[in-house]
Amino acid sequence: MRVGIAGLGRMGAHMARNLARAGHDVTLWNRSRDKAEALAAEIGCAVAATPRELAEVVEVVVTMLADDAASLAVHAAPDGLFAGRGARWFVEMGTMSPAHIEALGAAAPAGTRVIDAPVSGATQAAADATLMIMAGCREAEAGDLQPLFDVLGRKTVWLGRPGAGAVMKLAVNSLIHGLNQTLAEALSLTGASGIAPELAFDAIEASAACAPMLTYRRPLYLDEAAHAVTFTVALARKDMEVTATLAETLGVAMPQGRVTLEKLRAAETQGYSGRDMAAMVSFMRGEKS
């Protein structure tokens, strides 16, 4: 299948590699063209000059972008994806608001379809093709997308309607960011009492409170500065802001989510914005960025 990938950040680049290795005809676009050209040389694929050109040469466009504003610019600009004629599917796999997905669906060219299919899993899961995909459609409607999802992830949950994928991703991420904040507090408590971080983590991992993300992110929690960033504090704050807005719209109280958001905002004011979200451990300990 001819597949376009727009957005080659920490996740998108791994997804492009996996699709190319599976035999799909991949074309890349990225705002920084040099990044697209370097990846294209690595995996042997083409590079589009603009999002419009990308949409004209593929059947499916997969976008992995940072937020609603970035997604809107790539889709709806004069030289954006929706200006092209060729692609039949536009699959937004980034973390977006359901309102944005609705707007994209309304603006999409006739005869095309927008599917929200955000993913759960860190960069290693993207590299290993073990992502969990939350698709805002019924399985019977997915058509040609199923083989692509099978390449990218270990499981697809079909949520039945447009925007449901976006809502589910925000719900999952609110749990992740809440757990991240609670872990930071727990390690601050144990550290203040004199328990070594490694021993505290051993106990947490062996307890009923352990979640998979704690195990695969353990190296970051114990020595965040020594490892590559996988998900920034700024992106976590963005996720929680979008979630808080959605909760207000639906009339849902999320008091713990509000506290998580407040702490992320506070960390950003102290210079933690570009650091991995594991740096919330350092923030809660009162360390300067």
Image: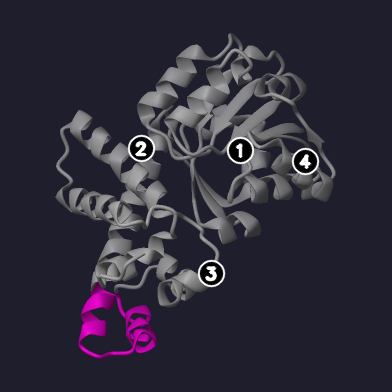
The answer to whether residue 146 is seen in the rendering is yes
Dot 3 or dot 4, earlier in sequence: 4
Mark 3 vs mark 4, CA separation in Å:
26 Å
Whichever of callouts 1 and 2 sits on the residue coming sooner in the sequence is: 1
**Which one is in front, 283 or 196?**
283
The three-letter amino acid code for the residue at tag 2 is Val
- The residue segment tinted magenta is 186-208
Q: Main secondary structure of the magenta part?
A: helix
Instruction: Report the Cα–Cα distance between label 4 and label 1.
Output: 13 Å
Report the Cα–Cα distance between label 2 and label 3: 31 Å
Q: Earlier in the sequence, mark 1 or mark 3?
A: 1
Spatial separation of the CA atoms under disc 4 and disc 2 = 34 Å
Q: Name the residue that disc number 4 marks.
A: 37
- Which of disc 1 and disc 4 is earlier in sequence? 1
Q: Secondary structure at mark 1?
A: loop
- Residue type indicated by callout 4: Glu
* Residue 227 image label: 3
Q: Is residue 137 visible?
A: no
